[in-house]
Amino acid sequence: MIQEQNPFFYYAMLVALVLLSMPMLQMNIGMQMRFGQLALLGLFALLSIEAIHTKQFNYTFFIYLIVMALLMIFISVNSPYPKLKQSTFFMKYLIIYPSIIYVGYRIVFKLSAEELIRLLERAALIFGLFQILLAFYPIPFLIHSRGGFTSQFQGTFFEAGWLAKAIYLTAITAFLLRIDRMIWPSSKKSLILLYGFLFICIGLTQNKTVWLALIASLGFLVVYKVTINTWIHERNQAFSAYSRDINTTLQTINAKLIIVGTLVFMGIFFIYNASLDKPIISEAVIQNKMDNERGKAYDVAVHLLQESDWLGAYGFGFVEKFFTTYTDKIIGLGEGSAVIFNSYLDIWISVGIVGLFYHLFFIYMMFSMRSLVTVILPLSIFVMSNLNPMVTSEWYYLIIGLIIGIKTRYLVNSPQL
């Protein structure tokens, strides 16, 4: 059995990930806090104390997060529009989200690449096992009931979609790290079984977003390999400096392999989709979402931005207040829904260009053509954020921290960002 070199932080992070997957476990400490949030805040304190003691705390990165949070809070406070639960956003952007980002960032430096891979794979496996267990043996205090919207295969998460995203983000990060770092077990049978099981778990959720994110990311790689990369190599002398910045993983992967892999994956998805009584994606599903859900919400969001001369800045909590009294019903929006489906439009409406820059700059901070994990994950998060309210999820910030940490440690070759 493989022993972890840093077992305390390894198992502390695993426990935090498992608790984060169980949002129904909460306690009141003046405000409702989930056990997963408390675990990550505790881990942030431990990692920060250790980093400060060893003079490795990234003050520049953390101060940036706090300053941006204060700017967004200032914009929200000075907005004259009516808002709901504004202080909850202040707490999240000023304390919870920066702490979670830094935990993701710092844990990369505390664990080896192999430890990090095992951590993410074990976490994804636990999510999947709970999904199957609760589907057949429900444990009421772990299941979030949403009436007719409750899915048999949502596991311990608020809804099936968030389970799919959590498994996808943890598993794809681990798998791409294996490819980038060439870390493979002597026998790959257990690995095939693990990822096959996780693939099935995601399929059972019938979530569309993760598949669209993966297809879009693979499509980008195909375009890069057959066009841009070929063009650069044909002009290697002129672009020699750029060529050296491209990781050998991307250089050595055959374009035909990516194309065949993408086509095989899409073929499997469409066969599976066609076999369902209620397909994940169909013309009727898309039309319904455009007429009654996302499409209608996007129209209203764009209208709000136009009304503000494209400045937005209506304030945190405005979206929930606005749609609570909005007369033309939109599925998924209203009281209890604080964010519209497109994260970037929502943050633009709420705190303007500052908020939009804050979130888009994360994509820049994560992205690098020097490894697969720093290509696929930023693109996946970008696609997901355009289709779902990702900016309200702790998983969004945790993965952002992880990828920035991976990029910093393994690509920038520096203990600091």
Image: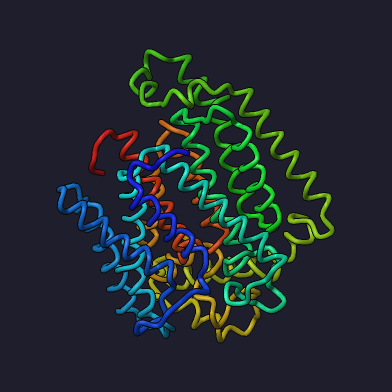
Asked if residue 1 lies left or right of residue 95, the reply is right
Residue 292, above or below 381: below
Residue 107 placement, left or right of 203: left
Residue 328 picture quarter: bottom right
Against 102, is 78 above or below? below
In percent of width and height, residue 200 lies at 69, 49
Along the line of sight, the residue nearer the viewer: 141 or 403? 141
In the displayed orientation, state which residue is furthest to the front: 1
Percent x, y of residue 372: 48, 34
Tell me if I can see residue 361 in this picture: no
- Residue 71 horizontal side relative to residue 124, left or right: left
- Residue at 66%, 62% (x, y): give it: 133
Image spot of residue 9 (x, y percent): 34, 52
The answer to whether residue 83 shows anywhere in this view is yes
State the scheme by which the image is colored. rainbow
Along the line of sight, which residue is nearer the eye, 242 or 166? 166
